[in-house]
Image (cartoon, grey):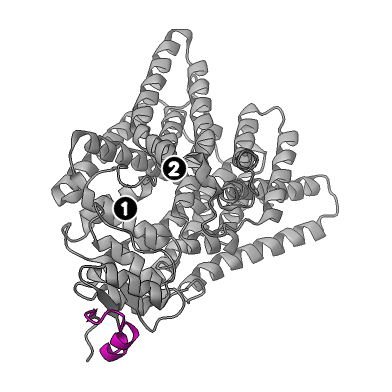
Amino acid sequence: MSTATVRVTAPTAGSPRPRPRDAAGPLADALVVLVLVLAGVVVVATGAQVLGLRPLATRAGSIAAAALVLVPLGALGLHLRRRPERPLARDRGAPARTLLVAAPALVLVAVLLWSLTLPHALRVEWFVNGDHVRHLVLVADERAHGALDYSVRGYPRAWHTTVALVRSLTGPPPGRADLVGLVDLMAGMVWLLFAAVALATASLTSALATRAGLAPWTAAGAAATAGAATLWPAFLGNYQALGFEGSLVAALVVAVPLREVLVRPVSVTASLTAWAGLLVMAHTWQLLLPVSGALALVATVARVRAAAPGRRARRLAGAAGLGVVVAAASLPAMTAVVGAVGVGHAVVADVEAPVPLWLLVLGLAATAVLAVVRRHDRALLVVLALSVLPALTALGLAVRLGIPVTRYYPAKLLWHSTILGVSMVTVVAFLAVVRARAQRLPTLVGRGVLAVTAAVVALGAVVTPVAAFGGAWSTVDGATVLRLLDVPGAERAQVVWSGGPLVTDVATRILLDGDRPEAGRRDTPQGGLTVAQECDLLRAAADPTVLSDRPEAEVRRRYACVPAVTVIGPARG
């Protein structure tokens, strides 16, 4: 393994010693900003609901909301830049290492850009699958309401509120039906969300590898390998394809504060990021609150203990202020989940949540190895313990409710420890090869295995994302869905019948709820329907309507149970 050449200018008398460059530093800063933006949007949207304002419902209101989020963050950034820091060492290899760490995320960005050359339907077909269609309805409802409100639906919506804000800033005026445009926006944003998860994984791995004693280039290689591993089917190919958007946001707001607590534990940045992560998690997935809460506590204690005795009270007061803001902004989401949902909801098994158990076991073993090797590094031990906490929460939840640990919600908790464990496995593998080489052991086989593994991981990191746009994840016909959504008055339809395969009709029917007012709306059935069940829906409707691309006569024969049915569909040339 090669090491980076770092040139350090000799310090003058009294000047601080230059600090080494962190290859993931600029990337980590960008991820911190993303977490703070998510938290800021939640605070503004929650406050707007309390004040009776609806900023997301108008373009002007959305601009004001965005300013309330971005201006304070900009001021904070300027303030932190003025704080004295040790100068950075001169390191010509740092930019190249940063690019290597970012490579897996850049692969996703490149694939997304390439997809713009594809036909429209093929570009978004992967998105109109799984839970993505339900998340789109939540975004449409949020934008129509104009603020973050849990009175009608208790589903946590930090991510949806952010997407709604972006939609209001960039899309047509609220009230104008444009589900196809919202599909385009969300497909792009969710794809980039996973790029952020891959980047967060690589950034955390870089910090762990450096802490474990790996040389700069070796640490960057480990980071790139871990980031690439997240693009494999166990992560990208499952959770992105299934539409588990909340899990992706949760993975991001766990990994980013974990790195901050490890790299700069006593900094303002670590404390703010941990508290922001706690707030976002309260509005994303409350079962991971033990992890986020522990991160906020660790960051606060470290910062207060590091202060001079005369400044500890001030820092403690600042932490208390952050805690009050987070608690107040989290209250609506927590009230909704406790009152309307409850922990008993975890027995629900909506769909299978796949977990590569072999990789989970490997990750736990690697975590134990790192804990033994670096047993005197308290900060690292804390991070390792927190990476295991989701799995422990899954076990506790399963025992508490008497359900298998592989059931939907416990399995998703296991998945979070698994994706964090990828970083541990990668660091231990690279560390083993480097140490074997240092001891002049016969490492040809070990290095060969590592090289082949890295090559296979890199290949999968390219193939899996590309396959998404080739129909590998598709359970619908994208062209049919888009064509039906574009029919004027499509939202009037209670029934959808097309020639599309698998769940094309179900996905289209669910998406149409995004054009219907949430208040008083009776959500469409979420699964497939028999003709008899469809007839029941039509009979119960004041204006029975079928949306179809089939010939009208054929549609009327199928639904002869309701002679007065209205048939609408795409114009036929």
Q: Quadrant of residue 551?
A: bottom left
Q: Which quadrant holds the C terminus? A: bottom left
Percent x, y of residue 454? 66, 61
Q: Is residue 550 magenta?
A: yes
**Nearest to viewer (mark 2 / mark 1):** 2
Mark 2 / mark 1, whichever is N-terminal? 1
Question: Does residue 167 appear anywhere in the picture?
Answer: yes
Q: Which residue is mark 1?
A: 163
Under tag 1, what secondary structure? helix
Q: Is residue 69 above or below residue 305?
A: below
Residue at image position (64%, 34%) is 385
Q: Which residues are magenta?
A: 549-566
Position of 245 compared to 397: left or right? left
State how many labels appear. Answer: 2
Camera-nearest residue between 432 and 234? 234
Percent x, y of residue 435? 77, 45
Q: Amino acid at mark 1?
A: Val
Q: Amino acid at mark 2?
A: Val
Camera-nearest residue between 80 and 474? 474
Under tag 2, what secondary structure? helix
Residue 341's disc number: 2
Residue at image position (19%, 72%) is 489
